[in-house]
Image (cartoon, rainbow, N blue to C red):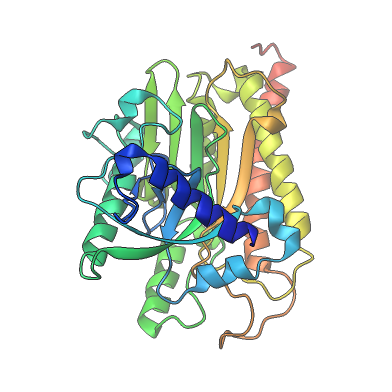
Amino acid sequence: MSAAASAIELTRARVADDEAAGPVDEPIIVQPFRHQVGGHTAVVTVPGSPFVAKPVDPKKREYAFYLRTPKALGGFIPAFYGVQSAQFSADATPDSTEAGPASDTESENVNVTKHDAKDNGATPTESNAWSLSMYKKALDLNSANSGMTDFILLENLTARFKLPCVMDIKIGKRSYADDASPNKRVRSEEKSRSTTSHVLGFRLCGMQVYSQPNGRYLRADKYYGRELTPATVPDALSRFFSLNLDRPLRSCSHSRNLVHAIVDRLDALKDVLSTLSGLRFYSSSVLMVYEGDPSVRAPPESLVDLRIIDFANTTVGGRGDEATNGPDESFLFGLNTLATMLRDLTSESDDSDSHGGSD
C-alpha cells in the first residue's frame, strides 16, 4: 500500500474510533481551519487526523501538481497524503484541538476591511473571519452536490507550532492559468498593476500574529495587502515579525533572528527553483510561519517554516499548457525582492544596534 493510501486508511480508522464521529458509515464532517489567512478556497481540518484539506479544484490542476511534484521541491511544499471524500456542515466550528489560544474559537470577529486597512494594519480578533467566510462559501457551493466533496489531504504546516504566526504572500506578477478566459486575464492583469505585484513581484494576502500583550491574534486579510504600496510593504513585514512581542524589530534580536532564518529558507528555495525548467507557479504563494510563543527555546531555524502553497493555476507541462523553458523567472523575481526587503530590514536593525540599540 502506498504512503498516501496508508494515510487515508489511517484517517478513516481514527475517525471511526472517535466516538463523536458516530457510526463508520456516517459522512466525515470537515471543520474550518483556524489558521487560514488567505486564499480563495476553504482550508479545513479532518477530525481525527493530523492533516489539513482543500477541495479538489474543478480542473484538478493542484491535484495533478502534487502527483507530479519534482523531488527537488519536496522540502518546500506541503506533504501530500492523497484524497478523502467528506462533507461541509453548517454546524461545523473550528477544531479546538489545533494550536492557539482557546478564545480563538469564539464566533465573533472584527477583521481588517478595505476601508480600515490604511490606518489599522492588523486588528485584534477572537476568531478567524477569513477562514469562516471561505468555509461558508464552500458550503454554499457544495450543497447542491449531495454535500459530498473530494479533498486533497495535506501536511498541516502550523501543527508543530504552539502559537503559529502566519503570513500568506502571493508571488509573481501573473496570477492566471494558461487556460484562463480573456476576461479573467484582463481582471488579473489589472489587479497586478493596481497592487504591489507588478512592481515588487509579490503582494501580501493575509496574516495573523499572536500578540503577547493582548493575549490573542491580530489579523489582516487580502484587502490590507491590496492597499499597501512598495513604500509601505517593508513596514508591514516588520510589523509581522515585531507585533508578537510588541517591540520594534530594531530593538529585538529574537525577531531579527527569525527574519534571518526566513531569508535563509528563501535563498535555499531560490536555489532549487533556479534548476527547474518548465514549471510556472501562477498565483501560488509562499507561506511564512514562525513560533509566536517566546517561551519555546530552540535555534531560529527550528522556529520558522516557509513553503510554496496553492497550485490551482500551476503549469507542470502537458495538459494543453503553453510551452515554457527554463525556470520561473517571474516567481524568482518576487522571491528575490522579498528576500532583499527582509534582508534590508534586519540590516537596518543590526546597524542601529551598533549605535546603542539593545534587547
Residue 38 image position (x, y, % from top left): 41, 50
Query: Which residue shows up at 43% across the image and 42% down it?
Result: 48
Query: Can see residue 94?
Result: no
Residue 61 image position (x, y, % from top left): 51, 73
Q: Is residue 23 left or right of residue 230?
A: left
Q: Residue furthest bottom?
A: 320
Circle count:
0
Residue 225 image position (x, y, % from top left): 42, 48
Which of the image's four quarters has the N terminus?
Answer: bottom right
* Front in this rendered view, residue 199 or 20: 20
* Front in this rendered view, residue 143 or 317: 143
Query: Which residue shows up at 66% across the image and 11% down it?
Result: 358
Q: Is residue 212 left or right of residue 133?
A: right
Query: Can see residue 181?
Result: yes
Which of the image's four quarters has the C terminus?
Answer: top right
Q: Is residue 99 above or below residue 193?
A: above
Query: Which residue shows up at 59% across the image and 75% down it?
Result: 315
* Front in this rendered view, residue 330 or 163: 163
Residue 341 image position (x, y, % from top left): 63, 43
* Front in this rendered view, residue 185 or 35: 35
